[in-house]
Image (cartoon, grey):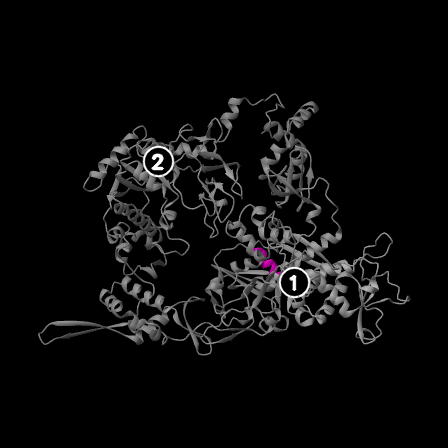
């Protein structure tokens, strides 16, 4: 693109503007997906998620962040991208090949200077031509049209796994029918299986922070890459004498091109850990009469990698498991009469890692030699070829397989990898830590077994025949020392109640007698005390059973505790100390006290250095300043959407091809300051609630249950469901030990074992989707004083209070201060509903499909929520008018409400009087109650005369009517001649006029009675 200052004539500038297509330019900088007549995605300026482009109207706008918008390409480039006016014109001129200066770029010059695409580099390096990577898509039309397409596509993918423009490589997976493989993850829509090879893996990290070269969609499963040659061979049932299985797509394609029919697997680790093998193997084996299968490994198959604190034998074990699984699977075919010769092989020259490297570099222009070399090696006694080495493993034992990776014994492993391991200060091998002793030039246990820890005694004697005899005796006392010094012991979690634990540094993990016994046996095996191991195998349960292990040393542990003004979040190697105004990150090794393992988040966070949202409250108004990181945070966006009650002013329900969705209104309604404050209030209270749930300090005077409810009033019994309440609650399962209880369970308060899985480590109890009339009063003492747990077969125990969340589609019954002070309600808008789910909105599943960046933003956002709670406490609540109306509606019931709305209808008729026949009239109690029962006879079982009166009083509050305004006593009772009367009035009632009393239908002669039979 031209970059030097040039003069752009006005006529040329206008020509550039006329040529520019707004949709093209926007998509150069933003990843958009079609939604009806519009396209939506992340804002390229502020990265908020409500950016919309409407091609038909040639307009764009950001609706939730910077709120910038416009209607032409130059405006977009200058305001949204930050280019100067001249830079924008130069960009467009280059984009549409419009000459500006005499120094025109010829097509040849452009081609020469154009950077080679990443995909082209990859194919070039693997020796695959443009033509060879093509495939033909068969369309399901009347003419059975074939369309040529790329299997290796120069493109990228967005967060929703849509193929978009970009300089990565997208791989298209095909089935044996030559059509794209489709998958469905967790009930989502069916999608074509693609995989991406990132050009820059450092920009795409997994949750554990590792760069990802390749990435597959969440839930897509493990599949084979089937080259075009394999698909054709199966279709025509061609004979394949040897089927090669290799790691990666390009290797499989390259081998196929040179006489070695191959399929590709999605990585050694996936192959080793997958629950089952791809079913397509069986079709290839049987249709192509395969006689031999060859698992082709890269030349670095024996290398080790010591990083992230993982054992040094992790990588060799992965390869061993993959090869063993390969052998076992193909050997199982013998059960159905198919006998295969099973091999694994690899290139001899480590300079050429994969078989595509061997073919492109080592055997360039002599590629046919590789297939012949494999054949020669397969019949060679030693499995040796000129370029490859193979091993026949059809009936090889697991022990012999382990020897390839020196996994059969620790001395063998240490000796083979001596040079790689010598430079390490300390490393793990299996369960044990080792180190290199320079003085003695040998490897030794980092924690040697000392004489007083040796849990066996060797007894030697000579029998009567003069023979030397040896006997090994288990030493209980020494075993106690051994286990204590390796972190094992007992922890008294309740008086006279103990659990087995293992302590590693300051991290405490619960364990079992079986795991302790297994540890001692594996330790014995690794130090190669075979005779002692035999003793343990024969009597392990006797020596290391639960009863004997209950005599281990007791550990007195002081655990990390938050206080009123601070909170701790624990991660893999660090922890955060969070206060209202600061977050301090420290190494986990500096923990002053102990922490349970299940409180440590399996993540390595990066603190962004500031709150994700700055929250202030002035003049009874909330002010929010959202950082750029916050605008990119999915969870904050979810909080924001579920707090927006004015969204229908901006969006309307539309339909396209039978599918309903929400689109922007052409004429949006005005967003008032009240709308904005209500939105902010709901967002902040959700953040406060999240911070309260996370804070593990117990303020016994201020313990509450978080009540998640729908903020839009609906009929009792009709659920708004799907508004995001459960997702909001279940976010805490990613953060703290949580127990979820089915809220629809009948007689929930009578279940003695309801909390049998709850213990002192449990932080949160969630009652999910509770039924109508949930017995909230039953939770009073549990919220403020603690819970009683009664595990089956164990002693009943009282535990300190937990945090509670109640998810409900209904109002929680109960009135008075006792109910209110134990609840902190948060309300959810109907932004998410039957036509728009959270998954639809984001295009992927929150939590399950997050990358490292989103997880990091999530933890930073939760830390901000904790800060907001520490700053404001639970004093600020959402406006409770709507919640009260929901509670009133539920107390009345829909049948009573329908009846009351009719007989007390305040709308005027043609005379100006209210339509409601009993409004502003004094009605006898039993008469009025009888009219209700005439309308709904079945209600007699549920509503007596006393309850009817209570419902009338509630209805007055609900409908804004006055109840018995003429009563002359504090009890608001109207009595006459021994009868009680009810008077419900609106503002048209004239108290100075003599009241008309209605005792029966005759008093209403001439009126049309509702529901009259």
Can see residue 922?
A: yes
How many C-alpha atoms fall within 10 Å of the one at disc 1: few (<14), some, or many (≥20)?
A: many
Q: Main secondary structure of the magenta part?
A: helix
Task: Determine whether 963 is above or below 337 in the image.
Answer: below
Measuring 66% from the left and 35% from the top, which residue is drawn there? 84
Q: Quadrant of the N terminus?
A: top right
- Between the C-alphas of marks 2 and 1, the distance is 65 Å
Badge count: 2
Residue at the disc numbered 2: 356
Task: Determine whether 881 is above or below 468 in the image.
Answer: above
**Stretch of the chain drawn in magenta:** 860-873
Residue at the disc numbered 1: 811
Q: Quadrant of the C terminus?
A: bottom right
Residue 985 location in percent, x, y?
Answer: 82, 63
Q: Residue furthest left?
A: 465
Q: At numbered mark 2, what does the secondary structure look like: helix, strand or loop?
A: helix
Which residue occupies the foreground of this view, 343 or 656? 656
Q: At numbered mark 1, what does the secondary structure look like: helix, strand or loop?
A: loop
Residue 464 location in percent, x, y?
Answer: 9, 76
Q: Quadrant of residue 467?
A: bottom left
């Amino acid at each position: 693109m031209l970059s030097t200052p040039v003069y752009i004539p006005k006529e040329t500038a206008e020509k550039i503007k006329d040529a520019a297509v707004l949709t093209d330019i926007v998509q150069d900088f933003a990843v958009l997906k079609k939604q009806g007549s519009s396209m939506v995605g992340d804002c390229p300026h502020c990265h908020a998620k409500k950016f919309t482009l409407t091609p038909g109207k040639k307009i764009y706008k950001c609706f939730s962040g910077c709120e910038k918008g416009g209607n032409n390409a130059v405006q977009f480039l200058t305001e949204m991208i930050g280019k100067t006016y001249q830079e924008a014109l130069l960009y467009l001129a280059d984009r549409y090949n419009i000459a500006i200066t005499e120094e025109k770029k010829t097509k040849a010059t452009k081609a020469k200077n154009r950077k080679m695409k990443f995909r082209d580099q990859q194919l070039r390096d693997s020796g695959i031509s443009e033509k060879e990577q093509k495939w033909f898509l068969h369309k399901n039309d009347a003419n059975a049209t074939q369309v040529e397409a790329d299997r290796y596509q120069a493109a990228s993918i967005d967060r929703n796994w849509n193929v978009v423009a970009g300089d990565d490589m997208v791989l298209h997976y095909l089935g044996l029918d030559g059509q794209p493989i489709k998958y469905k993850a967790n009930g989502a829509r069916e999608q074509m299986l693609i995989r991406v090879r990132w050009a820059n893996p450092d920009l795409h990290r997994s949750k554990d922070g590792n760069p990802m070269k390749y990435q597959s969609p969440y839930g897509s499963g493990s599949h084979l890459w089937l080259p075009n040659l394999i698909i054709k061979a199966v279709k025509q049932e061609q004979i394949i004498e040897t089927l090669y299985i290799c790691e990666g797509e390009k290797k499989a394609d390259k081998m196929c091109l040179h006489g070695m029919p191959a399929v590709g697997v999605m990585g050694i680790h996936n192959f080793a850990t997958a629950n089952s093998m791809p079913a397509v193997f069986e079709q290839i084996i049987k249709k192509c009469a395969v006689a031999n299968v060859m698992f082709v490994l890269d030349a670095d198959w024996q290398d080790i990698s010591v990083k992230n604190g993982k054992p040094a034998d992790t990588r060799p074990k992965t390869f061993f498991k993959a090869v063993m699984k390969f052998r076992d699977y193909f050997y199982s075919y013998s059960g159905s009469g198919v006998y295969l010769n099973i091999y694994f092989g690899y290139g001899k020259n480590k300079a050429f890692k994969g078989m595509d490297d061997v073919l492109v570099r080592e055997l360039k222009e002599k590629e046919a030699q590789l297939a012949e070399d494999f054949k020669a090696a397969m019949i060679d006694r030693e499995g040796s070829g000129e370029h490859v080495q193979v091993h026949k493993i059809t009936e090889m034992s697991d022990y012999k397989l382990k020897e390839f990776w020196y996994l059969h014994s620790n001395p063998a492993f240490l000796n083979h990898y001596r040079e790689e391991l010598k430079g390490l200060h300390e490393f793990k091998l299996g369960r044990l830590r080792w180190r290199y002793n320079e003085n003695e030039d040998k490897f030794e246990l980092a924690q040697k077994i000392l004489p007083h820890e040796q849990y066996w005694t060797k007894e030697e004697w000579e029998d009567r025949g003069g023979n030397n005899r040896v006997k090994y005796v288990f030493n209980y006392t020494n075993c106690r020392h051994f286990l204590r010094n390796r972190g094992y012991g007992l922890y008294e979690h309740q008086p006279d109640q103990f659990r087995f634990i293992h302590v590693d540094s300051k991290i405490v993990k619960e364990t079992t007698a079986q795991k302790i016994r297994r540890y001692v046996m594996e330790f014995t095996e690794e130090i190669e005390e075979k005779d002692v191991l035999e003793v343990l195998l024969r009597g392990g349960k006797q020596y290391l059973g639960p009863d004997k292990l209950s005599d281990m040393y007791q550990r007195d542990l002081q655990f990390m505790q938050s206080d009123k003004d601070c909170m701790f979040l624990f991660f893999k190697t660090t922890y955060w100390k969070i206060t209202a105004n600061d977050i301090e990150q420290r190494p986990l090794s500096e923990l002053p006290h102990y922490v349970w393992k299940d409180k440590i988040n399996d993540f390595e966070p990066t603190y962004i250095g500031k709150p994700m949202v700055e929250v202030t409250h002035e003049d009874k108004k909330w002010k929010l300043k959202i950082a750029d990181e916050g605008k990119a945070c999915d969870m904050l966006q979810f909080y924001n959407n579920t707090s927006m009650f004015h969204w229908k002013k901006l969006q309307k329900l539309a339909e396209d091809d039978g599918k309903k969705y929400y689109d922007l209104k052409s004429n949006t309604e005005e967003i008032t300051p009240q709308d904005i404050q209500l939105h902010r209030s709901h967002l902040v209270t959700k953040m406060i609630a999240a911070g309260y749930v996370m804070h593990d300090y117990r303020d016994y005077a201020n313990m509450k249950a978080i009540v998640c409810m729908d903020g839009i009033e609906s009929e009792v019994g009709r659920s708004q469901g799907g508004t995001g309440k459960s997702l909001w609650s279940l976010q805490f399962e990613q953060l703290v030990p949580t127990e979820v209880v089915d809220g629809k369970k009948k007689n929930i308060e009578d279940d003695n074992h309801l909390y049998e899985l709850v213990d002192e480590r449990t932080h949160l109890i969630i009652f999910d989707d509770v039924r109508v009339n949930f017995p909230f009063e039953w939770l009073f003492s549990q919220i403020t004083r603690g819970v009683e747990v009664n595990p089956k077969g164990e002693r009943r125990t009282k535990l300190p209070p937990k945090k509670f969340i109640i998810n409900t589609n209904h109002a929680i019954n109960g009135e008075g201060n006792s109910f209110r002070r134990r609840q902190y309600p948060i309300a959810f808008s109907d932004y998410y509903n039957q036509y728009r789910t959270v998954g639809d909105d984001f295009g992927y599943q929150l939590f399950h499909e997050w990358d490292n960046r989103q997880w990091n933003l999530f933890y930073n956002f939760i830390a901000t929520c904790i800060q907001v709670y520490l700053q404001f406490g639970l004093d600020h609540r959402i406006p409770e008018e709507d919640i009260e109306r929901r509670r009133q509606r539920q107390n009345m019931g829909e049948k009573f409400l329908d009846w009351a709305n009719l007989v007390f209808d305040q709308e005027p008729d043609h005379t100006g009087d209210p339509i409601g026949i009993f409004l502003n009239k004094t009605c006898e109690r039993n008469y009025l109650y009888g009219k209700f029962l005439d309308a709904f006879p079945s209600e007699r079982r549920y509503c007596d005369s006393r309850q009817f009166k209570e419902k009338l009083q509630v209805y007055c509050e609900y409908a804004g009517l006055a109840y018995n305004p003429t009563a002359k006593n504090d009890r608001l009772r109207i009595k006459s001649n021994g009868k009680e009367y009810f008077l419900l009035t609106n503002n048209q009632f004239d108290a100075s006029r003599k009241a008309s009393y209605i005792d029966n239908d005759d008093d209403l002669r001439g009126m049309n009675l509702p529901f009259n039979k």
